[in-house]
Image (cartoon, coloured by chain):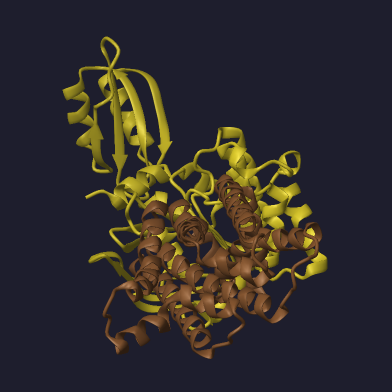
Chain colours: A yellow, B brown
Amino acid sequence: MIEVENLSKTYAGFQAVRGISFHVNKGEIVGFLGPNGAGKSTTMKVLAGYLPPTDGRIRIAGYDVVTDSIEVRKRIGYMPENVPLYADMRVTEFLRFRAELKKVARRKIKERVDLVEQRCSLKDVQNKIIGTLSKGYRQRVGLADAMVHDPDLLILDEPTIGLDPNQIRAVRDLIKELGQHHTILLSTHILSEVELTCNRVLVINHGKIEASDTPANLTKLVRGGGSILLEVKAPAPEVIAKIEALPSVEDCEVNLPGEGDWTTARVFGKPGVDIREDIFSVVRQNNWSLRELSRVKATLEEAFVELTQE
Amino acid sequence: MAWWTLYKRELSSYFHSGVAYVVLFGSAVAQSIQFLFIVSKVVEIHYTEANVLQIFFTWPLFWMLLLIQVPLITMRVFSEEFKLGTIEMLLTAPVRDWDVVIAKFLGALTFFLVLWSPIALDLTALQIFSSPPPPVYWSQIGLTALTILLVGGFYVSIGVFTSALTKNQIIAAVLCFALLFVPFGISLLRWIRNIDASLLAWVSYVSTPEHLQNAVQGIFDTRPLVYYVTVTILMLYLAKSVLESRRLKG
């Protein structure tokens, strides 16, 4: 659906995107992650046909973004960051205007607007002036606008920013549902959301793609995919020395506060090795009291930090 | 037909905004006062509707109104979209830059004509309430209307262009006023004594007051027609180019 080859974008002397290449297949939900200023929004603006690329080739649904811009724009629904809307229009009026602009057949406009209002839970504010709506509603009007012409591809720049947890959940469910019929590229800072909705994650940093994989595979990259939380009654230096002596252990950190004589340690094993049994035998040999030994799965957040931090 | 959709939205947005009503009200009041005053002055002489129009359009108040109205109408057309970021939403819909420029131009021009429509009412009232009614010369009235339309298009296109230059509406309005003043200022040169004849020819070529004078007298001149249409197209082309270059810069 999206093929990006060697895309670069420079403006005002600053190279925001440096020769990135990636592709998104039909039907995928792809999460676009990266720190602020990494080039996410710029890339999305180029894909949506708003900014022309400085270099590189982009094809969406087989059409070139530069030479067949209009054809591309007919097939995508783009929701910009901060959702700019005409504040003086009413919700239904605005969506009708957008549907007409996006070449929805005249007899289908009412039906489509009704449908997207229903799906984005906008029915109760349909006659309100957009300027008077809360952030959450405006966000949903933006989403409704992006999908009003039933596009093949949805490009959503931070669709859940500024929403409350219930609204986030509703938008997440909506995105999942949309993902059954549409291809979706979305950017966000809420990593738990990506884990729950996306088939694949693209991590971008300093204008370059750092990783492209499923959320599960990305978390495996983080020091063997997780750590062991250990809480024993023993002095910290002794615990570190004894545990790190194990051949299957890579690292043992004691940076969590202990309670009294108790020491809480995080133990990282060699990739692909289950070290719980080894740790337990160390505990038994030293006759330490044990009150916790559990596996902590690596989160996407850790993967993100590892991939994007210097 | 993207421009038609955009045109409808553009026109309705005027009637959603407070500034538009202030301009509308201000213009209507100024025009009516001027009209009343002129009529009270000319009733003594043997007058026609063309006489009334002639005096109307040569009064300084008319020009002051025109030079203030147009920047106020056009300042928001692009500036507001840049400021609010809605331009991004607009230009990622399947529309051409030309559609946007034309729609904004025609929207502003339509509103401009709405502002001047009270004159038609005034003239109608003059027909109904004076006895005997003054003679009507349609060619003169028609030519005057055409000239107003052309001058309106010319001024509005300059406003659309200056609005595309900046996201600050005040700057757009001041810039527009300054640019509108150039041809108007040149037309004032004809009042200089001992002015060179060849220079005077140039002055009268761009002098909008003179063009209106001729139209009101029923003289049809194609030179101003070419002048206005050319500058209008040029300004709209520049507005479109500015729009493009703003996107290139990001």
Q: Position of residue A113 (x, y in %)?
A: 75, 56
| B229 left or right of A166 in image | left
Q: Residue at x 60, y 50 (%)?
A: B33
Q: Nearer the viewer, residue B198 or A116?
A: B198
Residue A202 in the figure: left or right of residue B103: left
Q: Nearer the viewer, residue B189 or A147?
A: B189
- Give the percent coordinates (x, y) of residue B216: 59, 76
Name the residue nearer the viewer: A112 or A283: A112
Query: In the figure, A11 relative to A294: above or below?
Result: below
Q: Position of residue B86 (x, y in %)?
A: 51, 56
Residue A68 visible, this orientation: yes
Query: In the picture provided, is A101 more to the left or to the right than B86?
Result: right
Residue A258: quarter of image: top left
Residue A129 coordinates in the image, percent (x, y): 66, 42
Tell me what residue is drawn at x 42 percent, y 46 percent.
Answer: A300
Instruction: For residue A147, say whether it is visible.
Output: no
Residue drawn 80% across the image and 61% down it: B131
- Quadrant including the C terminus of chain B: bottom left
**Where on the picture, by quarter, is residue A202?**
bottom left
* Along the viewing direction, whichever of A101 and B186 lies nearer the viewer: B186
Q: Quadrant of the N terminus of chain B?
A: bottom right
